[in-house]
Image (cartoon, rainbow, N blue to C red):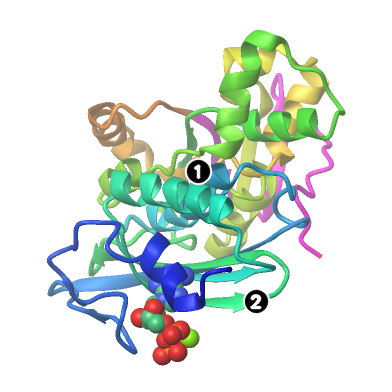
Amino acid sequence: MAIGEFELIERYFKNRQQSRFDVVKTIGDDCALLAPACEQLIAVSTDTLVSGVHFFDDMPADALGYKALAANLSDLAAMGADPSWVSLALTLPEIDEPWLEGFSEGFFDAADYYGIELIGGDVTRGPLSITLTVQGQVPKGLQLTRDNARIGDWICVTGTLGDAALALESLYGRVDIADDDVDYLINRLYRPTPRLRAGQVLRKVASAAIDLSDGLASDLAHIARQSGCKAVIDIDSLPLSQAFKRNTTLDQATKLALTGGEDYELCFTVSPTALGSVESALAHTKTSFVCIGQMTSGEGIEFKKNNQVVEFDHRGFVHF
Ligand code: ADP
Ligand code: MG
């Protein structure tokens, strides 16, 4: 006989982690009770993943558990917040124990690694969907936002762009990836790395930041609009992995790097005088980054190649 809701929570979600010092009540009461530190802002973000819309039905459950949390943690990284607490609302078509086993394993892999505690949630019956609310803390006044980039600031990104989008293309059967590169690229799609340490050290030095979930072109456009400037991108300077380059033509590479979603890298702006501090702070966290352009007066986003403006369809991932 299938287990009930309470047994499900007991078996797969309760007592899976060491409790944080700032969690007064965790799973099991009507509410969790949390004790935020003094002089901190609470950063909160919610994301829903729906089966067949945001992930394939046959995505391995452990990858899904890992990725659902990692993607949410990336939002905390973009604000410069330290991860603290997460709640999980699960809608399940049925109670499938092997699936729950895998999902919870992947979820707690990420949760333990990044030091965030599962403090509650909900379980309902219906088409498979996962809603997470993460909460983090950032010292008052040091938060990173999208609206503070200034004319003359450099535009930078961490890591490499387009890997996850290329992996997704291969899952759709639209491109072939060399056998040797499959593991790396699929891992970039299934186990993204939220740039939490980078976000924390950028607190004092970056002027604005956003995490790349929908694609560089559409995400950076938010910084440009909210900061009231124009972003000018040098297409030749986009950071691309060797595996990505080996499996794309130049045109494909540019399109995927600019519009492909789910990189979960950080894009940030920094004043020319603070660039040196960014270099040492990010070197300290072993996060690679490059400058890909500059904020100028105007609005929107512009692409340049060999110093010439080029047109580009930069809709990125359109939600509706
Ligand atoms: P209530 O009916 O009062 O909302 P529930 O019966 O839904 O409480 O949940 C009981 C406890 O289990 C609560 O503390 C809730 O936060 C927790 N919980 C429910 N679902 C999950 C889940 N998927 N993961 C973690 N905790 C959960
Ligand atoms: Mg409930």
Q: Quadrant of the N terminus?
A: bottom right
Tell me if 150 is positioned left or right of 198 in this view: right
Q: Tag 1's secondary structure?
A: strand
Residue type at tag 1: Cys
Check residue 306 for magenta coloring: yes
Q: Position of residue 290 (x, y in %)?
A: 47, 27
Which residue is the site of mark 2? 125
Q: Quadrant of residue 163?
A: top right
Q: Nearer the viewer, residue 267 or 1?
A: 1
Residue located at (50% from left, 76% from top) = 5
Confirm whether residue 202 shows in the render: no
Tell me if 59 is positioned left or right of 117 in this view: right
Q: Quadrant of residue 190?
A: top right
Q: Position of residue 251 (x, y in %)?
A: 82, 22
Q: What residue range appears in magenta?
A: 291-320
Please state which of the two labelled residues, at mark 1 or mark 2, is closer to the viewer. Answer: 2
Residue type at tag 2: Arg
Label 2 crowd (10 A; few <14 / some 14-19 / many >=20)? few
Check residue 259 for magenta coloring: no
Q: Quadrant of residue 128?
A: bottom right
Q: Tag 2's secondary structure?
A: strand
Q: Position of residue 19 (x, y in %)?
A: 19, 63
Q: CA distance from mark 1 to mark 2?
A: 38 Å
Q: Position of residue 83 (x, y in %)?
A: 31, 58
Q: Quadrant of the C terminus?
A: bottom right
The quadrant where ligand 1 appears is: bottom left
Tag 2 or tag 1, which sits nearer the N-term?
2
Figure check: 32 above or below 71: below
Q: Which mark is residue 267?
A: 1
